[in-house]
């Protein structure tokens, strides 16, 4: 008897931003920049200004996935504290992925404090 593999589908518009973010997290520990569009990011407060600040703090040529992943992680930490139990494991995996990219996450967090 074959077990059908369930395909991961993007959440509908009615679902919460947190659910959408968690469901689109990649197994490797990052968010794919092609799955979260600019309109969604703006709707949760991840502005192009914040993206530009993150980009300016990263090595030239850093991937859009890395930039988006840092932005989403910081959004979770600053805007979803009430539901931390739902995203804590995702954030730990994400932090490991960012660390593997040799990125100083605390420096970026500190720089974004003034923008929030």
Image: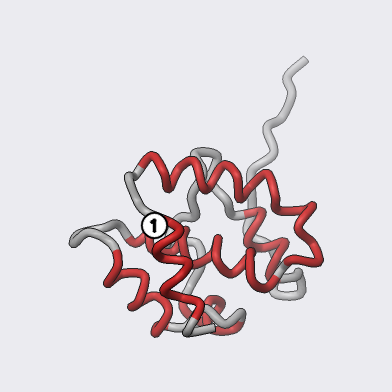
Residue 85, image x and y in percent? 79, 52
Answer few, some or many: residues within 10 Å of disc 1's Cα (few below 14, many 20 plus, some between 14 and 19).
Answer: some
Residue 74, image x and y in percent? 55, 66
Question: Residue 80 appears in which quarter of the rendering?
Answer: bottom right
Using the image, determine if residue 39 lies above or below residue 79: below
Quadrant location of the C terminus in the rendered image = bottom right
Rendering colour mode: secondary structure
Quadrant location of the N terminus in the rendered image = top right
The one nearer the camera, 102 or 8, is 102
Q: Which residue is mark 1?
A: 65
Asked if residue 25 lies left or right of residue 65, the reply is right
Number of numbered discs: 1
Q: Residue at image x 74%, y 66%?
A: 81
Q: Residue at image x 55%, y 60%?
A: 73
Q: Residue at image x 61%, y 50%?
A: 91
Using the image, determine if residue 38 lies above or below residue 80: below
Asked if residue 59 lies left or right of residue 82, the reply is left
Using the image, determine if residue 17 lies above or below residue 1: below
- In this view, which residue lies farthest toward the left? 60
Q: Residue at image x 49%, y 39%?
A: 28
Asked if residue 94 lies left or right of residue 13, the reply is left
Residue 16, image x and y in percent? 75, 70
Residue 46, image x and y in percent? 51, 78
Local SS, label 1: helix
């Amino acid at each position: 008897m074959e077990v059908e593999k369930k395909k991961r589908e993007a959440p509908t518009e009615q679902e919460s931003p947190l659910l959408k973010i968690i469901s689109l997290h990649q197994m490797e520990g990052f968010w794919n920049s092609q799955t979260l569009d600019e309109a969604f990011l703006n709707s949760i407060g991840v502005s192009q200004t914040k993206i530009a600040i993150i980009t300016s703090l990263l090595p030239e040529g850093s991937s859009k996935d890395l930039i988006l992943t840092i932005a989403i992680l910081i959004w979770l930490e600053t805007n979803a504290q009430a539901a931390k139990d739902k995203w804590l494991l995702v954030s730990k995996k994400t932090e490991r992925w960012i660390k593997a990219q040799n990125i100083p996450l605390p420096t970026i967090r500190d720089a974004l404090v003034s923008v929030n």
